[in-house]
Amino acid sequence: MELEAVIGIEIHVEMKTKTKMFSSSSNVFGADTNTKVSPLDMAFPGTLPVVNKQAVINAIRVCSALHMDIDHELWFDRKNYFYSDLPKGYQITQQRRPIGSNGYVEILCDNSMKKIHIERLHMEEDTCKQIHYADCTLLDYNRAGTPLLEIVSLPEIHNGEEAMKYVDAIRRIVVYSNVSDGKMEEGSLRCDVNISLKEKGQDKLGTKVEIKNLNSLANVEKAINFEIKRQSELIMNNLPVEQETRRFDETHKETVLMRKKTDAVDYKYFTEPNIPPIKLSDEFINDAIKSCPELADVKYERYVKAGLSSQEAYQLLQDKDLSSYYDSCLQYNPKLAKQIWNFLVVDISSYLNKRGETFALFTLKAENIVKLLSIIDKGDISYAQGRKVFEKMCEKELDPNIIVESLNLKQNSNTEEIKAMCLEVIANNNQSVIDYKAGKDRAMSYLVGQVMKTSKGKANPQIVAKLVKEILDSK
């Protein structure tokens, strides 16, 4: 029997707004425990929710990026449950009328594009953070009320790789639209995966198992692949797959039981009475979409058009700050697209990694980096010399031309002068000429080195190598 996995994914995205979804409390990560809390967050009597306008704009932008139908009227519902993570005993969400529906995202799988359809996108508020100990649970209400987007896919994903690419596509959309920082390790983007197995070619689905709170792209793929293997072994051995909620154990690279599931929970939804329906004008929706920052897919096409390979463009998009700095450089000299990419990804990234820093903290002006690369491109200094200039720029930011002059680094690219030195060196090293003609490649390297020595390191090494070879081949 051939089995096929059927996977649906729910993604929760914490929005990057100044305040919470329905209160004026500051929405920041990492603040001291219970310092970003208002009376509304704590459900004090007499407090009323007010919808965060920026959160609505954010939701519209993501809906547009996901090709969704956008509801022109906002409705909110109460999701009633009596847990400790929301003091009022219910969560404000959009159960019956999500702001977005019927969308899709495309991912590249097996050298072809696959369309994953998305059922719904709705806004809601996050719950508080619970810290569990052996004898008690502590509650941090800083997170309670944080604006959330929940994005629910249709069950059209069939393996861990597809799931990972789907989550990454959503992450790039919310990061580049400036809706969220998308940091899975901090919980800004969290995934719940529903997975079941069925016989290939059959419609009847197997028992559904949920994997909660996957916190990295790698773990999404690993958890799903393990769960497919686990369920397959149970089915092939005529053992039942039970309805469970599981989590991924990173140490052992396996899913482990959290709790058994019996019946679906009845949350008793009803329309939120304290938030009347809000009509969204065409102008408001269009302005939200038009003002959205450039999305990753648009950047990708632009980078490839500028001359980068598909892999190079994708690597840039993995770091929004790197991509932003690249764009800043590109505007000064688009013809150096490849050289800029190489210097940022290789040299500057290495410099930052050694210091435990990122492009978010990199302060050198993009204009000066492009000036440096232009000097290298003209052949005035070598790439190795360019690295020395860059180090000096990091010590004290100066125009690279000033540094090149102060260090007396400018190369001699005068072809006639270099040719005269080459002829002189070759005339004084007849044995090297004989060795070159005999096929000994080291002879040419030796002669190039002698020319560079004669020029005191000032001759352009590319021109030297070219002229030495031309002269030797003509003999």
Image (cartoon, helix red, strand yellow):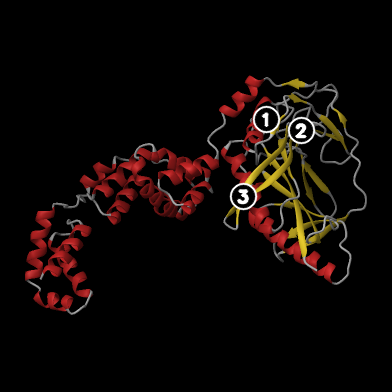
User: Circle 3 sits in a helix, a strand or a loop, which is it?
Assistant: strand
Q: In the image, what residue occupies the spot 65% across and 21% down?
A: 282
Is mark 3 in CB contact (under 8 Å) with mark 1? no
User: In which quadrant of the rendered image does the C terminus lie?
Assistant: bottom left
Amino acid at the residue labelled 2 = Pro
> Badge 2: few (under 14), some or many (20 or more) residues near its Cα, within 10 Å?
many
- Left or right relative to 149: residue 275: right
Secondary structure at badge 1 equals helix
Percent across and percent down for residue 402 are 24, 42
Is residue 242 positioned above or below 321 on the image? below
**Residue 98: numbered disc:** 2
- Circle 2: element type: loop
Q: Earlier in the sequence, mark 3 or mark 1?
A: 1
Using the rendered view, name the quadrant where residue 105 is placed.
top right
Q: Is residue 279 visible?
A: yes
- Corner quadrant of residue 244: bottom right
The residue where tag 3 is placed is 107
**Mark 1 or mark 2: whose residue is earlier in sequence:** 1
